[in-house]
Amino acid sequence: MSKSEIEYHVKRRDAYLQLADAENEILETLAPPNMKQTEAGHPEAAKNYDIEKISWVPKQGDKGPYEQSDDVNNHNHKELLKDLAAHKGKMTIGQFFVWTFQNGSTIGRKKRSF
């Protein structure tokens, strides 16, 4: 495959991702208040937490920068830990990949790249 063909496919993929993001935003505004759309576009019950209300500390890892939280007394942190446990310790929330560290109480998050 030539370089120009690869560039074409990358641009096409990026355009599809932008369309999907726009469609998800519309669907979220149309959904009932107690429902939200998942990454796959399927409705699910609203979460009992807000990851933006958790205290995050910037860190540098082997694979680049990420954020870490040890905010164990925060309700949002506790609820996210429960959700992570239900997803085997890792999942995607919005634009973030989120995981639990081996100690079971520390959470990491890294912004996904498209």
Image (cartoon, rainbow, N blue to C red):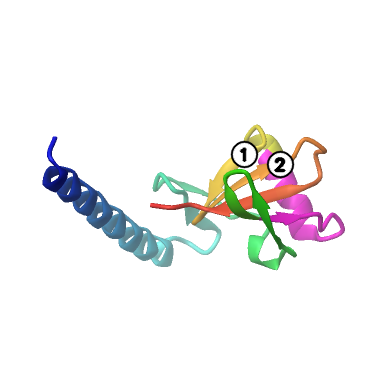
Q: Judging from the image, what secondary structure is the residue with disc 2 in?
A: strand
Spot occupied by residue 26 in the image (x, y as percentages of width and height): 35, 65
Q: Which residue is mark 2?
A: 100
What amino acid type should be assigned to the residue bearing mark 2?
A: Thr
Q: Outermost residue toward the top?
A: 88
Place of residue 114 in the rendered image (x, y in percent of width and height, measured from the top left): 38, 52
Q: Residue at x 12, y 39 (%)?
A: 2
Instruction: Using the image, tell me which numbered label, if any, was put on residue 90.
Output: 1
Give the amino acid at mark 1: Lys
Percent x, y of residue 3: 16, 44
Does residue 71 appear to the left or right of 95 in the view shown?
right
Q: Is residue 80 magenta?
A: yes
Percent across and percent down for residue 107 are 72, 48
Q: Is residue 5 left or right of residue 36?
A: left
Magenta residues (range): 67-84
Mark found first going from the N terminus, 1 or 2: 1
Crowding at mark 2 (Cα within 10 Å: few <14, some 14-19, many 20+): many
